[in-house]
Amino acid sequence: MIIPFILEKALSLYAEKEAVVCHEHRNTYQQFAHRTYRLANLLHTMRVKKVTVSQSSTRTVTNFWKLILQQRI
């Protein structure tokens, strides 16, 4: 799987640098990785399967990540 590799590489090189900026919310690579792993564990615990995201659901995915960045999930 390529995404975890990319995240781990970015984390090892840029842990304290900003990775995500969404309005007033800012996360370093370390914070982003931590939240990503928490989400992955939650989804695994809920037995959520991999799915393909269509173009029409891009807005839903974007809004979902905004909630994560605002620490509502």
Image: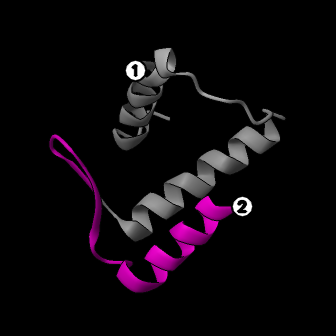
Percent of width and height locating residue 53 = 59, 27
21 to 64, vertically: above or below: below
Which residue is at the front of the view, 3 or 45?
3
Which residue is at the front of the view, 18 or 38?
18
Percent of width and height locating residue 9 = 51, 78
Name the amino acid type tagged 2: Met
Residue positioned 56% across, 22% down in the render: 54
Name the amino acid type tagged 1: Arg
Percent of width and height locating residue 55 = 48, 21
Question: How far separated are the C-alphas under marks 2 and 1?
Answer: 25 Å
Residue positioned 67% across, 48% down in the render: 40
**Dot label at residue 14:** none
Q: Is 8 part of what is drawn in magenta?
A: yes
Residue placed furthest toward the bottom: 13
Q: Is 3 part of what is drawn in magenta?
A: yes
Secondary element type, mark 2: loop
Q: Which residues are magenta?
A: 1-26
How packed is label 2: few (under 14 Cα within 10 Å), some, or many (20 or more)?
few
Residue denoted by label 2: 1
Q: Which image quarter holds the N terminus?
A: bottom right
Compared across the picture, whether 51 is left or right of 21 comes to right
Compared across the picture, whether 13 is left or right of 51 comes to left
Compared across the picture, whether 17 is left or right of 9 comes to left
Residue placed furthest toward the front: 55
Percent of width and height locating residue 10 = 44, 75
Q: Mark 1 or mark 2, which is nearer the start of the sequence?
A: 2
Residue denoted by label 1: 59
* Numbered circles on residues, count: 2
Compared across the picture, whether 13 is left or right of 42 comes to left
